[in-house]
Every structure is written in structure tokens, then in C-alpha cells.
Image (tube, helix red, strand yellow):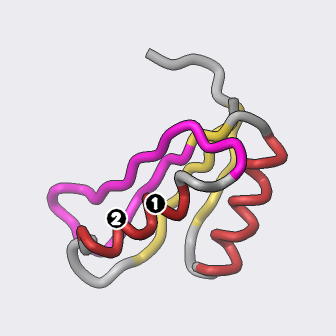
Amino acid sequence: MFAIIGTWPVEGPLDAEALGHIAATVSQQPGFVRAIWGQAPDSDSEAHAVVVLQDEASARSMADGIRTAIPSASVQVVRVLAEA
């Protein structure tokens, strides 16, 4: 498995309705396994996400799409070595 780890600037708390739409879209992507989104409890200027996919090709393709859609995002593709 592979994961995309991303951080991007936002203005204020994440919107539940927008996140629902994003989650529905992401869950339909090829190779999707699971995803989480969040913000630090003491800062609402950044958002964070981890999206797990079955294979590297799916992860790289989605990461490229994120970089195109959110140029200010910091996005890394990593190999998942363990999980609990």
C-alpha cells in the first residue's frame, strides 16, 4: 500500500459539507483504501490529510491531481510499511 500525506493552507475551520463532498469524491478514486482529514486543535490555518491507496500508480496519480488542484499544498507519496 501507499499513502499520500498532504498539508495545505486554509482560512478557518474545515467545512463539514465541503469535506463530505471531498470524501465522496476521493473514495471513488482507483485504488482507494481509506482517508482522514484534520486540523490541529489550536490552529485553523492548515489542513492535513492522509489518503491510503492500494498501489503506487494510484497514489502518484492522485497526488498529481492534488498538486494541480491545490498548488499551495505540500504533498508526499510514501510506502506504507506498517499499520495498527
Q: Is residue 65 magenta?
A: no
Q: Which residue is mark 1?
A: 24
Instruction: Tell me if 10 is positioned left or right of 6 in this view.
Output: left
Residue shown at the point (37%, 54%) measured from the top left? 37
Residue at horizontal 84 percent and vertical 46 percent from the top: 57
- Up-down: is 78 above or below 46? above
Q: Quadrant of the C terminus?
A: top left
- Which structural element holds mark 1? helix
Residue 27, position in %: x, y?
53, 52
Q: Which residues are magenta?
A: 30-51
Judge by depth and name the residue closer to the eye, 9 or 27: 27
Residue 32 is marked as none
Identify the residue at horizontal 23%, vertical 79% (top origin): 12
The residue carrying pointer 1 sits among few (fewer than 14), some (14 to 19) or many (20 or more) residues within 10 Å by Cα, namely few
- Could you tell whether 74 is left or right of 24 in the image? right
Q: Is residue 37 magenta?
A: yes
Q: How many marks?
A: 2
The local secondary structure at tag 2 comes to: helix
Amino acid carrying label 2: it is Gly
Q: Residues within 10 Å of mark 2 (few under 14, many from 20)?
A: few
Q: Position of residue 68 (x, y in %)?
A: 70, 79
- Relative side of 16 to 74, left or right: left
What residue do we see at 70% from left, 34% from top?
54
Q: Are marks 1 and 2 in contact (CB under 8 Å)?
A: yes
Looking at the picture, tell me which residue is in the foreground, 75 or 36: 36
Disc 2 marks which residue?
20
Is residue 36 toward the left or the right of residue 16 in the image? right
